[in-house]
Image (cartoon, rainbow, N blue to C red):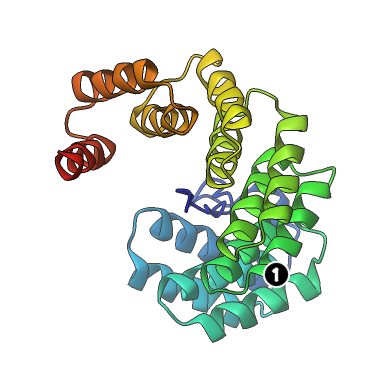
């Protein structure tokens, strides 16, 4: 299985202690809710979950219809390993602001990580299709990773290709396509995606290890040896080099 990580977008923290000018015209409880939310987001970013929970809960007490606070609470309670609460908060946030792509992306992360990939993929695709979303290629990448984690290779490939249509030199999507093609034993296609990755000027232990396995599948022992040497020399302490050494020991 490919390596992948689904990363939520922590909602922007404006000027975490000051009162933004557009809040001055809001009713007092709504202004207070926004300020407590910004403080909660700041604590969340810093990893202080108890303080984040206190501020976000207070923000919701002051304004239960604060959609951004509800979505942030969804992320917080997912981090606190309370999935039912997390999903409930996201459902409420989307009932108030159903076209918000950040809410959709973050809810999708929670769903995919909780083995609810079909719903998660749907929300990722909705975020990607939103013209206001700044990084639709990332949402498609996440949708592909989510689908693959459920064993849906057809959906995974379709989403990775959509990401690459939007951003042809998107290295993470190139990696995922190469890894998927390797998994399907389409070695020539996998080699093409590896080459595109490297043409983008990137080199690291994961792509070298992937390239080595692709060339092994093609029976290219010279290239296998070259990639093995590069792994050992350039990334001696990487997990991929340890896998290589283990495989060599086993073969020996």
Please tell me which residue is depicted at 40% across the width and 75% down the height of the picture. Answer: 80
Please tell me which residue is depicted at 54% across the width and 72% down the height of the picture. Answer: 73
Is 147 in front, or is 226?
226
Instruction: Say left or right for 2 vs 121.
Output: left
Residue that sits furthest to the bottom in the current view? 84
Report x, y in % for residue 150.
60, 66
Instruction: Say left or right for 111 vs 98.
Output: left
Please tell me which residue is depicted at 62% across the width and 68% down the height of the picture. Answer: 71
Report x, y in % for residue 204.
37, 26
Quarter of the figure with the C terminus: top left
From the viewer's perspective, is residue 16 above or below residue 236?
Answer: below
Q: Quadrant of residue 160?
A: top right
Q: Secondary structure at mark 1?
A: helix
Report x, y in % for residue 138.
64, 42
Task: Estimate how packed mark 1 is, as few (under 14), some (14 to 19) or many (20 or more) residues with alpha carbons within 10 Å.
Answer: some
Q: Quadrant of residue 193?
A: top right
From the viewer's perspective, is residue 81 above or below residue 27?
Answer: below
| Residue at the spot of label 1 | 118
Is 132 in front, or is 28?
132
From the viewer's perspective, is residue 84 above or below residue 69?
Answer: below
Q: Could you tell me if residue 65 is visible in this image?
A: no
Q: Could you tell me if residue 157 is visible in this image?
A: yes
Is 8 in front, or is 147?
147
Report x, y in % for residue 102.
68, 54
């Amino acid at each position: 299985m490919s390596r992948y990580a689904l990363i939520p977008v922590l909602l922007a923290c404006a000027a975490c202690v000051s009162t933004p000018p557009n809040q001055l015209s809001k009713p007092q409880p709504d202004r207070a809710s926004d300020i407590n939310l910004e403080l909660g987001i700041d604590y969340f970013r810093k990893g202080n979950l108890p303080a984040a929970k206190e501020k976000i809960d207070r923000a919701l007490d002051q304004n239960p219809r604060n959609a951004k606070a509800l979505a942030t609470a969804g992320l917080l309670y997912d981090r606190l390993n309370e999935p039912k609460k997390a999903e409930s908060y996201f459902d409420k946030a989307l009932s108030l602001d159903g076209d918000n792509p950040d809410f959709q992306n973050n809810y999708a992360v929670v769903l995919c990580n909780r083995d609810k990939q079909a719903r998660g993929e749907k929300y990722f695709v909705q975020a990607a299709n939103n013209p206001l979303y700044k990084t639709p290629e990332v949402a498609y990448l996440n949708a592909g990773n989510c689908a693959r984690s459920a064993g849906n290779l057809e959906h995974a490939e379709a989403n990775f290709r959509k990401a690459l249509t939007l951003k042809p030199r998107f290295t993470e999507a190139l990696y995922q396509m190469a890894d998927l093609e390797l998994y399907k034993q389409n070695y020539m296609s996998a080699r093409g995606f590896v080459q595109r990755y490297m043409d983008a000027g990137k080199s690291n232990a994961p792509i070298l290890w992937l390239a080595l396995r692709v060339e092994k599948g093609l029976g290219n022992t010279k290239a296998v040896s070259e990639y093995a040497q590069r792994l050992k020399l350039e990334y001696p302490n990487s997990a991929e080099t340890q896998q290589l050494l283990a495989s060599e020991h086993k073969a020996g």
